[in-house]
Amino acid sequence: MGKALVDQLVLSGENLVVGISRSGMEEKDNFLPIILDLGNTELLISKIDKIFSEGDFQRIVLINNAGWIGEIAPLGKLDPAGIGQIHTINLIAPSILMNEFVHRYKDVKAEKLVINISSGAAQKAIDGWSGYCSSKAALNQLSLVAEEESRLHKWGIKYYALSPGIVDTGMQHDIRSSAPENFSRRDVFRSYKSEGELSTPEEVALQVLYLIENQVDFQEVLQDVRNF
Ligand SMILES: NC(=O)c1ccc[n+]([C@@H]2O[C@H](COP(=O)([O-])OP(=O)(O)OC[C@H]3O[C@@H](n4cnc5c(N)ncnc54)[C@H](OP(=O)(O)O)[C@@H]3O)[C@@H](O)[C@H]2O)c1
């Protein structure tokens, strides 16, 4: 989904797009790729100046899209190192990026928006996904608190935690490849693929762009593309 978002956003030469991933993408005139493991908090903090640009922008948008499903298995079988890692990628990295966003831009006279890509799993108890469900639930709550702080301090920053639906990406491939004894719903997710029920990353990228352009129609922090 991150790549589809970048592909859409760079189409307008008026946008300056900065994209973080571990594998990187080709640099363009208006696209700056930053190769960074968001699971490495010290490295993220050391590169923060490179991530946030200064300039006379009309609109500044932070999209926290990177995420990890984690090790798919019940508690009792998990590698403890992975437990730390999923919360670092899905919650701590977005928190650090949001903190910096507010610090830098709260007094800037531009339209300011943060979209945290969440999941329906934030509001469901799905076996084998303890780290994913709990980190996305915390991301929702982080978004709600950030919105409340922005309202209270009149910073003019709008926040969304957006569920993208079920999207045909590497994450879904990992879910379908999980061991059935570690995840009771594995075959349900296999059927989503075989029945053609997944949306494409390109479709979701367009829905994110729609949200950016039509914020007045979306007042609540918690949003789901299936209601668009
Ligand atoms: N796919 C779905 O059905 C679905 C449903 C609900 C919510 N979501 C959410 O949608 C978002 C995008 O998911 P996706 O389906 O596109 O997942 P994906 O196919 O696994 O892609 C994950 C993306 O995050 C980046 N990433 C992962 N770990 C990273 C790290 N440690 N440091 C930097 N970048 C990292 C990856 O780039 P590199 O590998 O290059 O680092 C990749 O761009 C996630 O937040 C996910 O939780 C997805």
Image (spheres, rainbow, N blue to C red):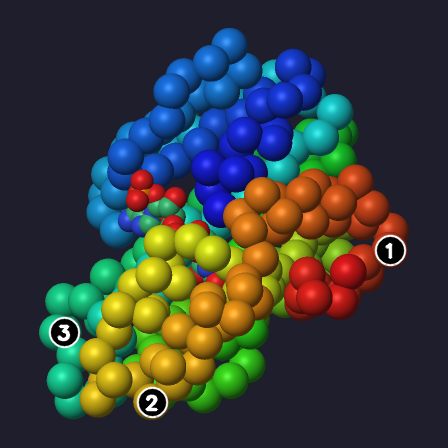
Residue under circle 1? Answer: 217
Three-letter residue code for mark 1? Asp
Please tell me whether mark 3 sits on a helix, a strand or a loop.
helix
Q: Tell me the residue at 21%/89% (across/down).
A: 181
Kindly identify which residue carries mark 3.
80
* Nearer to the camera, 211 or 109: 211
- Amino acid found under the numbered disc labelled 2: Ser
Q: Which residue is mark 2?
A: 184
Could you tell me how far apart the alpha carbons at marks 1 and 2 are, in whole angstroms? 38 Å
Residue at the limit of the structure toward the right, as seen here: 216
Disc 1 is placed on an element classified as: helix
Please tell me whether mark 2 or mark 3 is closer to you in this view: 2
Residue pictured at 39% horizontal, 35% vertical: 20
Q: Indicate which disc, 1 or 3, sits on the residue closer to the N terminus.
A: 3
For the view shown, which residue lies furthest in the top direction?
A: 29
| Marks 1 and 2 in Cβ contact (< 8 Å) | no
> Which amino acid type corresponds to the residue marked 3 in the rendered image?
Pro
Residue 224 falls left or right of residue 196: right
Residue toward you, 162 or 46: 162
Mark 1 to mark 3: distance in Å?
42 Å
Residue at x 32%, y 30% (from the top left corner)? 24
Question: In the rendered view, would you say 62 is above or below 224?
Answer: above
Q: Residues within 10 Å of mark 3 (few under 14, many from 20)?
A: few
Mark closer to the chain start, 1 or 2: 2
Dot 2 beta carbon under 8 Å from ligand 1? no
User: Considering only vertical position in the picture, is 157 above or below 55?
Assistant: below
**Splitting the image into 4 quarters, where does residue 198 fall?**
bottom right
Residue 205, image x, y percentages: 61, 44
Res 14 → quadrant: top right
